């Protein structure tokens, strides 16, 4: 019997070998497929967890950015109030009544300059902090994921040094920006009489012309040239200087500052900043429109304006009238106040006082509106993504 089985096996040995190879190969292939499936599952799970962690980290950075912007509002307001001091001019009117006309002209320029400055300062501060904190967030997340645990060369000391660069904006940059804005504003409104009546559309035209002059899109043909702004990075931080001796930390800090400057001077940043300025202008006009009478039947020559009108020459009024007629009318804002008018002298305290509400951290004010701007959020997300993807598996 055994010899018979042996004989059968011998006669079919090739078939048995082939069958063994096939079954063995199938078993190995099955085990390989199972290994690959487990490996793919682990990779996908790791990727999902990585992206989820990255998303959560981004949301935390966004919350920190918004809180920092709101905390910054007090410093921004203090700089504008200090450099464009309307209270000192009001006090001078009381102390020097014989110079009232000259002082009121200065107060008019300060009022318009304050209103424009609030918009520009808010837009620049919000977009700059968004870029800075998102860039820093990308760096810290990148280093956090490099070795799988929180051991990073982006130390707390380095983070403090990087964030300290924003102090230049408060200490020097904003003052430079306000000087440039004031110079452009003075050229546009210097011939505007205090007693002149403005519709909200004409006021929009004046603000738009100031904005365009700052963007170099019109030429004022003055002896001292056009009014224009420097690159945004010049107002935000001093030019990074390469250290004489470069430790790893100093080199990383230098690279971070350079990359920040490159972003601030990029076309994308300019587009976002300009969009925020447009949003800010609309917000400013909406707030001013609330002070306009609902009907133009109100007597424009109030006692308060009569006092301001004293000493203003008819010649100056004619020059201002010709200037106003050149401005386009707006197609938006409240229909009830669109045809209403308000004297420039009455608009001055309104424009001057906008700084207090606009730079308030309370909801529905300018800073909150700018923080939620879609283009700003997209810019911050792109910056974060660009500096946090090196160790993330796609």
Image (spheres, rainbow, N blue to C red):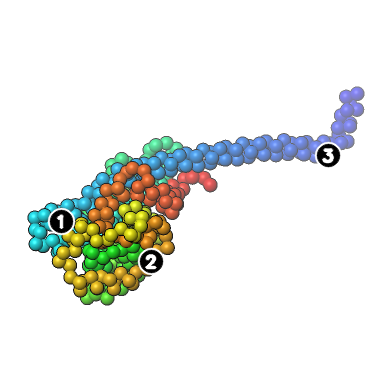
Q: Is residue 220 above or below residue 123?
A: below
* Residue 239 visible in the current orientation: no
On residue 329, which mark appears?
Answer: 2
Real-space Cα distance between discs 3 and 2?
A: 97 Å
Secondary structure of residue under mark 1: helix
Which residue appears at 10% of the width and 59% of the height?
Answer: 97
Quadrant showing the N terminus: top right
Real-space Cα distance between discs 1 and 2?
A: 32 Å
Secondary structure of residue under mark 2: loop
Which residue appears at 22% of the width and 73% of the height?
Answer: 224
Identify the residue position indicated by label 1 in the image: 89
**Residue in front for this viewpoint, 361 or 190:** 190
The percent position of residue 241, horizontal first and vertical second, equals 26, 56
* Residue 328 visible in the current orientation: yes
Q: How packed is label 2: few (under 14 Cα within 10 Å), some, or many (20 or more)?
A: some
Q: How packed is label 1: few (under 14 Cα within 10 Å), some, or many (20 or more)?
A: some
**Residue in front for this viewpoint, 30 or 314:** 314
Q: In this view, does 74 lie above or below 8?
A: below
Residue 57, image quadrant: top left
Which residue appears at 26% of the width and 68% of the height?
Answer: 188
Identify the residue position indicated by label 3 in the image: 14
**In this view, the mark in front (1 or 3):** 1
Which residue appears at 40% of the width and 44% of the height?
Answer: 62
**Residue in front for this viewpoint, 8 or 86:** 86
Number of marks present in the image shown: 3
The percent position of residue 26, horizontal first and vertical second, equals 74, 38
On residue 293, which mark appears?
Answer: none
Q: Is residue 358 left or right of residue 97?
A: right
Q: Which of marks 3 and 2 is nearer the N terminus?
A: 3
């Amino acid at each position: 019997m055994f010899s018979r089985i042996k004989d059968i096996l011998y006669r079919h040995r090739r078939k048995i070998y082939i069958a063994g190879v096939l079954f063995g190969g199938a078993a190995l292939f099955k085990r390989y497929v199972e290994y690959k499936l487990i490996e793919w599952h682990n990779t996908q799970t790791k990727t999902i967890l990585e992206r989820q962690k990255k998303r959560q980290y981004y949301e935390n950075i966004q919350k920190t950015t918004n809180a920092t912007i709101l905390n910054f509002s007090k410093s921004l307001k203090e700089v504008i109030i200090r450099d464009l001091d309307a209270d000192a001019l009001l006090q001078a009117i009381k102390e020097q009544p014989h110079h009232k006309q000259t002082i009121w002209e200065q107060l008019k320029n300060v009022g318009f300059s304050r209103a424009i400055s609030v918009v520009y300062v808010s837009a620049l501060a919000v977009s700059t902090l968004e870029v800075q904190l998102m860039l820093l967030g990308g760096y810290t997340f990148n280093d956090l994921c490099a070795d799988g645990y929180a051991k990073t060369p982006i130390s707390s000391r380095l983070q403090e040094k990087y964030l300290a660069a924003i102090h230049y904006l408060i200490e020097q940059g904003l003052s430079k920006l306000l000087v440039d804005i004031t110079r452009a504003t003075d050229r546009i409104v210097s011939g505007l009489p205090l007693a002149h009546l403005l519709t909200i559309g004409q006021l929009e035209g004046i603000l738009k012309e100031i904005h365009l002059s700052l963007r170099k899109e019109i030429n004022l043909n003055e002896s001292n040239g056009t009014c224009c702004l420097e690159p945004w990075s010049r107002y935000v931080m001093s030019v990074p200087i390469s250290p004489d001796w470069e430790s790893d930390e100093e080199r990383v800090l230098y690279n971070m500052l350079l990359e920040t400057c490159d972003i601030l001077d990029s076309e994308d940043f300019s587009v976002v900043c300009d969009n925020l300025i447009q949003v800010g202008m609309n917000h400013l006009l909406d707030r001013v429109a609330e002070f306009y009478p609902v009907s133009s039947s109100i007597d424009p020559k109030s006692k308060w304006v009569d006092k301001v009108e004293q000493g203003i020459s008819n010649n100056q009024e004619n020059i201002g009238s010709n200037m106003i007629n050149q401005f386009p009318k707006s197609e938006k804002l409240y229909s009830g106040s669109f045809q209403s008018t308000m004297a420039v002298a009455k608009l001055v305290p309104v424009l001057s006082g906008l700084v207090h509400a606009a730079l308030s951290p309370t909801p529905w004010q300018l800073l909150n509106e700018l923080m939620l701007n879609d283009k700003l959020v997209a810019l911050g997300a792109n910056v974060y993504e660009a500096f946090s993807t090196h160790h993330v598996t796609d």
